[in-house]
Image (cartoon, rainbow, N blue to C red):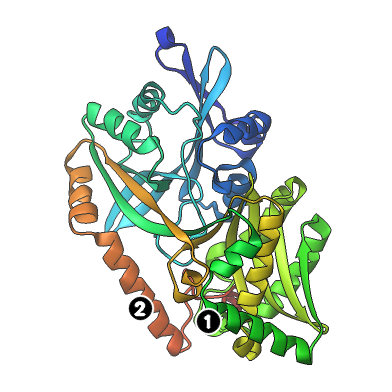
Amino acid sequence: MKKTITTYNRSSEYEIETLTTLEQLATIRTEWDSLVKQMPIVSPCITYEWLATWWICMKDDDKELYVVVIKKSGTLIGIAPLMLVKDRFLFFKIRKIEFLSMSKYADSPSNIAVSIDFIIPNNNDEIINTLIQFLKNKFNWHFIRLNPVASDSPTIENLKTATIKSGYKYNANVVFDNVILPITDSWQNYFKSLSKNFRKHLNAAEKRLKEKYEITVELHTAKEELRLHMATLLDIEKRSWKWDIGISINSIVFCDFFNRLIDLGADSGMIQLWLLRVGNKYIAYDYNILFQNSVTSLKGSYDSDYHSYGPGNILLAKEIEHAFQQKVTSINMLWGMTTTKQRWLPVTKTYMQIFIFNHGWYPQFLNFILIKLHYLSFERVFIEYRDRLLRKFNIRLRNSELTRIDQLNEIKRK
């Protein structure tokens, strides 16, 4: 088993260890959980369950697991969940360091990473500086890219100070605003605060649906129930608008992540699967994560035949009411302030992307292209239009978020 232990600056008593296999990560799981619980910013995406599952699903030959753990006097005080990535920029090769669970484009609809950060509860500049010095001569990287980091995370300023001190080029920019519903007061008072028209529409739609069907709302958290109902989710997706023109839960970019997360996350009770059933037919679902009294809505969909009833809103209302009852503090609806989300009176929270460019002409060239010319933003827009155009001609790409797993199997058979 590969294992590298490097001691940096013995006088400060910091020891740095790099873990490069899942087996090594499992050995610090208890300490990992303890550090996460001490973090001031709540995010399920820095848990062992999330990151280990992500690596199981997303690893490939161009990625190398590179989790850096920091110890002082033998006690674990910090974790940097990183990976080394080999990529291409136009016709040039790139070596970069990124957070585990990052997507290529932070503001892509296929990005399910709510917030990622260094797992360092006492995020002081000395620890961050030690980490940067450790990475200084590792991997011969061109740049480090980290996102999405909460704008109020101390990592942003501490990392800026440490990198500028080392002579690196530093850049931080906004990548999106997450839509968050604070859970305060009571459900009754909150519901009354919603617009009169929205409440009237919601109540009327549910009443019309009840006149035709027996309505049942189900919440599943047990591992076996979750596994059983993954087929239910897929069946709902097949009857939704996402199946043909959106990004379904069956997209190849997810690499079966939602199913595999059950293996590690269900036992801790972090997965909540909400289902709306009319008669014997399921017509809507929400796949949520409950972590430290905060809910994150990862994926949801509904049967398009019931669009006029607003099944997604009916189900969400039950989820929000349940959140008030269970003393949940917030519901993260992820990025994108759509009209549907606005009706629930949420607030927004800003998330950042950090770039650190190494010394040398090539990293500085990448700095000019990526930062000054905003290359990634243009590339994402181009790829999105390209993929949607090709899909109209029934051309499916192996790496497109618009391609489903079942379509990829069809491509392989051709």
User: Is residue 303 among the parts visible in the rendering?
Assistant: no
- Above or below, 119 against 316 in this view is above
Residue type at mark 2? Tyr
Q: Residues within 10 Å of mark 2 (few under 14, many from 20)?
A: few
Q: Nearer the viewer, mark 1 or mark 2?
A: 1
State the residue position of label 1. Answer: 197
The one nearer the camera, 52 or 285, is: 285
Q: Quadrant of residue 104?
A: bottom left
User: Is residue 327 among the parts visible in the rendering?
Assistant: yes
State the residue position of label 2. Answer: 385
Measured in 3D between alpha carbons, the distance from the residue under mark 1 to the one under mark 2, in whole angstroms, is 36 Å
Q: SS class of the residue under badge 1? A: helix
Q: SS class of the residue under badge 2? A: helix
Which quadrant is the C terminus positioned in? bottom right
- What residue is drawn where x is 67% and y is 73%? 315
Expressed as whole percent of the image width and height from the top left, the position of residue 31 reads 64, 28
